């Protein structure tokens, strides 16, 4: 009694054949289901990876564009300051007195009765003459 029978004969009837066929269909259905699910999971992972990659890339580009915008806005502010400075300089250059002053200072031109003295500048910058008259004798 300790040895169970190893040789059992299966019955070949219609019920047994249907059960065998049903079991085979269930196994094949499971295989197809697993294949579909694995394909779907792979597809979802690849598609999700592409979406995330695209979002990260666009976020980086957006950050770069924002930084560039800030830089260009600062440049616009600086250029507007330069524009106002240059417009003031143009207004000054339309004034004859200002042009005469520039000519006397830069080209050492003088009016009638003026004497121009060239005084060498000290390297220390302690001379009071430098701060005042720039070497011109004005009346």
Image: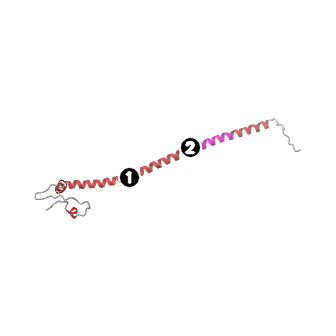
- The quadrant of the rendering that contains the N terminus is top right
Q: Which residue is mark 2?
A: 46
Q: CA distance from mark 1 to mark 2?
A: 38 Å
Residue 45 horizontal side relative to residue 71, left or right: right
Query: What's the residue at 49%, 48% (across, down)?
Result: 56
Question: Element type at marker 1?
Answer: helix
Residue 2 horizontal side relative to residue 37, left or right: right
In percent of width and height, residue 138 lies at 15, 61
- Of tags 1 and 2, the one toward the viewer is 1
Sequence-first tag of 1 and 2: 2
Residue 18 horizontal side relative to residue 42, left or right: right
Q: Which residue is mark 1?
A: 71
Say few, some or many: other residues with alpha carbon within 10 Å of mark 1 (under 14 / 14 to 19 / 20 or more). Answer: few
Query: What's the residue at 40%, 50% (across, down)?
Result: 68
Query: What's the residue at 44%, 49% (across, down)?
Result: 62
- The quadrant of the rendering that contains the C terminus is bottom left
Query: What's the residue at 29%, 54% (across, down)?
Result: 82
Q: Which image quarter: residue 123?
A: bottom left
Q: Which image quarter: residue 115?
A: bottom left
Find out whether residue 40 is within the magenta segment.
Answer: yes
Which residue is at the front of the view, 12 or 120?
A: 120
In percent of width and height, residue 75 lies at 34, 52
In percent of width and height, residue 85 lies at 27, 55
Which residue is at the front of the view, 44 or 133?
A: 133
Task: Answer whether labels 1 and 2 touch (C-beta < 8 Å).
Answer: no
Find out whether residue 110 is within the magenta segment.
Answer: no
Q: Which residues are magenta?
A: 29-43
Which residue is at the front of the view, 71 or 9?
A: 71
Question: Element type at marker 2?
Answer: helix
Residue 131 horizontal side relative to residue 40, left or right: left
């Amino acid at each position: 009694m300790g040895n169970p029978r190893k040789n059992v004969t299966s019955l070949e009837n219609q019920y047994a054949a249907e059960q065998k066929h049903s079991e085979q269909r269930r196994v094949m259905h499971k295989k197809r289901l697993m294949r579909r699910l694995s394909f779907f999971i792979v597809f979802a992972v690849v598609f999700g990876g592409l979406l995330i990659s695209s979002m990260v890339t666009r976020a980086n580009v957006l950050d770069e564009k924002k930084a560039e915008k800030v830089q260009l806005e600062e440049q616009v502010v600086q250029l507007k300051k330069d524009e106002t400075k240059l417009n003031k300089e143009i207004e000054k250059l339309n004034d004859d007195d200002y042009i005469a002053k520039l000519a006397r200072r830069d080209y050492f031109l003088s009016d009638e009765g003026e004497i121009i003295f060239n005084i060498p500048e000290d390297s220390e910058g302690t001379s009071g003459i430098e701060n005042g008259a720039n070497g011109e004798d004005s009346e």
